[in-house]
Each structure stands twice: as C-alpha cells, then as structure tokens.
Image (cartoon, coloured by chain):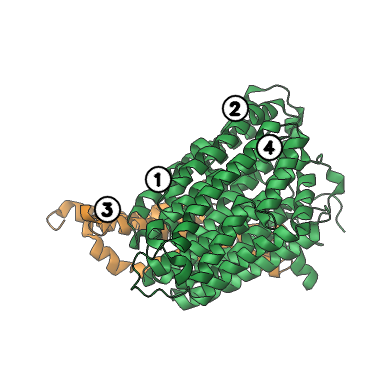
Chain colours: A orange, B green
C-alpha cells in the first residue's frame, strides 16, 4: 500500500478520532447508548484500519500478538474479578452496591461497578476483534490436497 | 466466614472455572495452566458435592446474581435434579486434568496446550452454568459459552487428522442453528409472558390457554435443543466431531455435553412447560417416542458397521440418547427417574470407554479396529477397561447399564408400553454385536504387527479410566445413591411449583431497598 498516498494520509487523520470516539462510547455508555461491546469494536476498527492500510506486519509491531492475547484474558479477569471483589465485601456476586462508599447511596456503587465491568468487556472485545483480524490476515497457507 | 462461603457456592460453581480460564491464557505456560486447571476442576467438584448434600432432601437454593430479585434479575437455582447433573459434569471434569496431559502431548502441538486448558475450562464454565441457572436466557448464554469452546477443542485435533477442522466447522454450523432455534423459542416465550425466569415462566404459561405462539415456541426450543442433544435425525454433526477431536476432549464431551443438553431439555419440558400442557404430551407421544426408538435401532446398526472405534462409540452415544428420550415419553415419574439414572450411568460408562479408547489411540496411533488387533494381549489393562465398559453399555447385570435399563423397562411396563419394552431389550442385543466386534479383534485376532512393541497406557490415563469404569460397576452393584438422587430429581421436576417450600438464601444486608423490598432477616 506504499503508493496509496491518499489512503495512508486519510487513515492517519481518521485513526485518532476513531479511537477517541471509541473511548467516548465506552465511558459515556452509562449515560447514553453505548458500552463495552460497541466501544471495543470501534477501538479495534481503528487498529484494523491501520493494519489494512499499512500491513499486518506494522500492526504486529504496534500490537504484539502476545499483548493482544494478554489483553483478551485480562478483560475477562476484570469482569469476573469485579464480581469476586463484591463477594469479598459481603455482597452477592456482581452486586455493585458493594462499591458504594456510603451505604446510604447504593446507586453510586452501581455506577462504579458498571464502569469497571464495561471496561473489562471493552478490553476483551477489542483484543478479540484485533486477534480475529490478525488471524485471518496472516493465516497459514492452505491445506494441501494431499493432506486430506 | 464458612457460612459466607456456603452462601456463595452456587455462584462460585461457575466463577472458579471462569476465572481460571483467562489465568491459563495469561500465564501461557502449559505447566502453570495444568496446575490452575487441576485446582479449578477439583474445587468445582467439591462445590458440587456440597451443593448436592444441601439439596438432596428436596430443598431449593436460590442465589440472586448482582443482588437483583428474580424474576427481574438472574437467579441461580439449585434443586436435587441440577445438583445431580452438576455432580456428573464436575466429577468427569475433575478427572480430565489427570487424563489429559499424557493424551494431548501426542495430539496437540505443545504451543497450544495452554489454549487447550483455557478452552476446556471455558467449556466447563458453560456446562456448569447451563445447569446451575434458573434463567432461561442465561441458559442460552452459557450454552453458547460451552459450545463455542467445544468447537475450538474439536478443531485442536487437526494436528493428528486435518478432518478435525471440517468436523469442527460442521459442528459449528449445526450447533449455531440449534442455538438460534433455541433463542427464537425463548424470544417467543418472552413476547408471550414478559419474563425469562423459568419458575415465573411456568406460572405464566399455566395461565395461557390453547395458544399457537406457545406451541411454536415449544417446537423451536425442542428442535434447537434436539440439535444440541443429537436427537436422532439431527445427530449428523456428532460422529465426526467425536471421532476427530483429541481423545481427552471426546471423553469429556461424550460424558458431559450431550448430558447437559438433555438436562436443559428436561428442565424446559417439566419446569417451564409441564404435562398439563397438551401440546407437549402429544409431541412426546407422537414425535419424540418414535424418534427415540428409531435412534436406538438406526444408530446401533450404523455403529455395527463402523471401522473407526471412536465413531462406533459416537453412534452408540446417539443410540443411548434414544434411551434417555424414551424414558421421558412414558410420561411418568418412573420414566423420568429412568432418564436421569441413565444420564448419570451413561456419562460414567461412556466417559470411561472413550478414555480407554484414547489410551489405545495413544499407543497404536490409530482408532481403527483393524489396527487394534491383539490389543487385549499388548495392553491388557486398557482393553479390560474397555470390555468392562462395553458390558455396562450392553446392560449386563452388576453394571450401571443394567440399572438404567431395568428402570426404563419397568417404566415401560408401568405405562403399558409393551412394544418399547421389548425394543429396549432388542436394541441392547445390537450393542452386544458392536462391542463384540471390538473384543474379537482385540483378543481373538493376531496383532496387526507382532514385532511392534506396544507398552501399556501411561498410569495416570489408566487410573482415570478405571475410576470411571469402577464407578460404572459400583453404581451397578449399589445403585442406592443414583436411584435416590434421580428420584429426588424427578420429584423436583414433576412436583408442582410450590414457592412456599423454598429455602431462599439471601445476603443478610442487601443495600438496595427498592429492589429487594420484602422481608429478609
């Protein structure tokens, strides 16, 4: 894609707003439409655009596959771990009321809880989307006819 | 502290493997992954034992996820029936970490071992989650968690045989169609009743009279789950998936995945719907009963002609599913008890058989009966386990299989279904033929390659195989545990939904008064 100057420049312009918009969708998700799933996909779209325009090898330099895998696992851990923390605080699994600093305002806890949970979701969705793209873009040669 | 822990057990049942799975992936080393898997699966097994001990007297544990009251929130609901299924799944799951390392070493590239454990733990999470939850949509979510990880597990057999990839893809397509049908059925139920909690659904469905939407929802759910169960005409994904998956995966899936799907079907047939719903009774009598009998015969006959031992056992599994469905169609408590007993006995037997076959495949490098000639002399302990498991599959007295068939036949007599009773015996004779084919090759024929030295299976594989085979004999001789648990489960399923009898364990200090308005101490 070296000769596609326009594509390269335009995508350079586009990627930062895409990532920023993803963060907006992520963290505004508890006030308006949005949340971890959508934000994760949008965030991944920025990286996938980079991978398409500049090549998968460049994308791998920005996001090493090992890091992608770790992020995918980390997101699930954040989600499940939040539930465990609320368990340790004496509440049911994933009862966000546990995170309220003042028991009189349990809804504050709901607020904190959902932000952390959605962050975990966003992280895993982003990592898995990128991993799927990398897997398809850099897949091994076809299976030979003789292997069947 | 201990009381707190007991209170959280229903959630921990799924949370422990769920947390262990990403940890395996994060560390990436196969030794650490194995250790994590071992701890997590043993912990889930202990939890399921404690849960079963709590509910076997007929009480119900209800755990409110996130502190939201059902029917609005997701409820984990444990009664004698699903605690028993939890025990089956986590019991087989606890053996897998002992069995798997030696088996996957030759079947899966080393770099993928930590992924294998990750996918296995996710599959375990999904299966336990399906069983533990009392929320119909949550069932769908966990069913997909287990199915998606299963597709990956099956595909991991590709190093040994690339056909694993096509069978995994085939399984993915069929499994997804099944899941879609199931969720369409749930959607229709939700439109009708406005709720997804199973107990609440049951209450609201009782109020509906003859309703076409309800019938369509029931049909969608039956077909969707039928695909997951491998109910007779929808079974074609199963033989290849079982044949080409790594041996440890086959043993785990054969013993748990279809069992959990059958559990889900029973849950919907009896907890959500009931025998009071005429469409269900008609469907069971006129559709499921003939299909079950056809499965018993067609699959057994196909099994006789298989050359691949794994495929042979896979077809036998389809026939066994027929027995389980047959028990339900007798529309009686004995029938349902027979189904639950067979669910347990078949899980133990088939798990043991597939483990023995896995050991044979490890040493001989091929699951073809032709190549396994003379195995009876070269691997006496493994082959003895296979024969013992085969006896249980046939239903010889003193084995678990006999207890299942005894209950099935008495249920058939009780319902005055003479023809099915005779057919049960007749199809058992078909099992004699396919088990005998293997025995003949292993004991009576000369080894395919007499100069080749074949060692006995690794000790850990042998021990886990014999634990299951031993269990299938133990529960054949002393069936008091299985029959007690199964009849408690059947009582729970067939009993009218009586909300007053429930023990509800609630946290002592929920802080959301507007969500949990009424009395907790």
- Residue B397 drawn above or below residue A77: above
Residue shown at the point (76%, 42%) measured from the top left: B334
Gap between marks 3 and 2 measured at Cα:
42 Å
Task: Name the chain under label 4.
Answer: B
Disc 1 versus disc 3: nearer the observer: 3
Gap between marks 2 and 1 measured at Cα:
26 Å
Q: Are marks 4 and 1 in contact (CB under 8 Å)?
A: no
Image spot of residue B240 (x, y percent): 42, 49
Disc 4 versus disc 3: nearer the observer: 4
- Residue A111 drawn above or below residue A65: above
Q: Are marks 4 and 1 on the same chain?
A: yes
| Mark 2 burial class by Cα count in 10 Å: few <14, some 14-19, many 20+ | some
Give me the disc on residue B170.
Answer: 1
Task: Name the chain under label 3.
Answer: A
| Mark 3 burial class by Cα count in 10 Å: few <14, some 14-19, many 20+ | few
Image spot of residue A126 (x, y percent): 42, 58
Residue identifier under label 4:
B421
- For label 2, the SS is helix
Q: Can residue B209 be seen here?
A: yes
Give me the disc on residue B209.
Answer: none
Q: State which tag comes first along the sequence, 2 or 4.
A: 2
Residue identifier under label 3:
A148
Residue identifier under label 2:
B216
Task: Name the chain under label 2.
Answer: B
Q: Quadrant of residue B91?
A: bottom right
Q: Are marks 4 and 3 on the same chain?
A: no
């Amino acid at each position: 894609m070296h000769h596609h100057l326009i594509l390269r420049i335009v995508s350079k312009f586009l990627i930062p707003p895409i990532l920023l918009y993803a963060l907006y969708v992520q963290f505004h998700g508890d006030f308006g439409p949005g949340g971890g799933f959508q934000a994760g996909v949008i965030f991944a779209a920025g990286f996938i655009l980079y991978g398409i325009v500049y090549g998968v090898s460049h994308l791998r330099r920005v996001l090493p596959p090992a890091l992608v895998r770790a992020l995918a696992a980390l997101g699930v851990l954040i989600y499940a771990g939040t539930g465990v923390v609320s368990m340790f605080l004496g509440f049911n699994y994933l009862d966000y009321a546990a995170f309220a600093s003042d028991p009189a305002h349990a809804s504050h806890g709901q607020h904190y809880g959902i932000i952390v949970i959605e962050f975990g979701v966003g992280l895993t969705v982003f990592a898995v989307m990128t991993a799927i793209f990398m897997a398809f873009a850099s897949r091994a040669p076809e299976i030979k006819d003789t292997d069947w | 502290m201990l009381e707190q822990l007991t209170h959280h057990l229903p959630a921990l049942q799924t949370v422990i493997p769920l947390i262990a799975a990403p940890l395996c992936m994060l560390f990436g080393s196969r030794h650490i992954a194995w250790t994590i898997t071992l701890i997590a699966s043993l912990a889930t097994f202990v939890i399921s034992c404690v849960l079963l001990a709590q509910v076997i007297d007929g009480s119900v544990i209800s755990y409110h996820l996130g502190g939201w009251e059902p029917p609005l929130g997701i409820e984990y609901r444990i009664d004698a029936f699903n605690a028993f299924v939890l025990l089956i799944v986590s019991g087989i799951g606890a053996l897998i970490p002992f069995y798997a390392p030696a088996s996957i070493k030759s079947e899966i590239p080393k770099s993928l071992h930590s992924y294998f454990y990750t996918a296995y733990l996710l599959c375990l999470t999904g299966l336990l989650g399906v069983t533990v939850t009392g929320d119909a949509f949550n069932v769908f979510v966990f069913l997909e968690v287990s199915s998606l990880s299963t597709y990956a597990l099956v595909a991991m057999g590709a190093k040994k045989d690339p056909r694993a990839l096509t069978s995994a893809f085939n399984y993915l397509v069929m499994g997804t169609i099944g899941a879609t049908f199931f969720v369409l059925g749930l959607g229709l139920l939700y439109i009708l009743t406005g709720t997804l909690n199973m107990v609440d659904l049951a209450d609201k469905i009782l109020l509906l009279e003859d309703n076409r939407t309800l019938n369509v929802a029931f049909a969608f759910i039956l077909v969707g789950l039928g695909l997951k169960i491998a109910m007779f005409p929808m079974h074609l994904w199963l033989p290849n998936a079982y044949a080409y998956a790594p041996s440890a995966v086959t043993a785990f899936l054969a013993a748990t995945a279809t069992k959990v799907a059958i559990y889900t079907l029973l849950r919907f047939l009896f907890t959500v719907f009931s025998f009071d719903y005429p469409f269900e009774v008609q469907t069971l009598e006129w559709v499921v009963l003939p299909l079950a009998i056809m499965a018993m015969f067609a699959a057994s006959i196909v099994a006789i002609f298989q050359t691949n031992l794994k495929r042979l056992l896979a077809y036998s599994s389809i026939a066994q599913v027929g027995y389980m469905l047959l028990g339900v169609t007798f529309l009686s408590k004995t029938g349902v008890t027979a189904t639950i007993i067979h669910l347990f006995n078949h899980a133990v037997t088939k798990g043991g058989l597939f483990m023995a076959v896995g050991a044979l495949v490890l040493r001989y490098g091929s699951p073809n009966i032709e190549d396994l000639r003379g195995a009876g002399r070269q691997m006496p302990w493994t082959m003895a386990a296979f024969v013992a498991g085969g006896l249980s599959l046939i239903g010889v007295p003193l084995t678990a299989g006999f207890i299942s068939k005894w209950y099935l036949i008495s249920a058939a007599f009780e319902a005055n279904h003479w023809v099915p009773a005779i057919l049960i015996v007749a199809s058992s004779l078909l099992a004699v033929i396919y088990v005998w084919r293997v025995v003949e090759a292993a004991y009576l024929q000369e080894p395919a390659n007499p100069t080749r030295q074949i060692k006995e299976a690794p000790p850990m594989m042998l021990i886990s195989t014999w634990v299951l085979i031993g269990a299938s004999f133990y529960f054949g001789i002393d069936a008091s545990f299985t029959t007690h648990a199964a009849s408690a489960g059947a009582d729970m399923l067939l009993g009218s939904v009586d909300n007053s009898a429930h023990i509800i364990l609630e946290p002592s200090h929920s802080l959301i008064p507007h969500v949990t308005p009424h009395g907790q101490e």
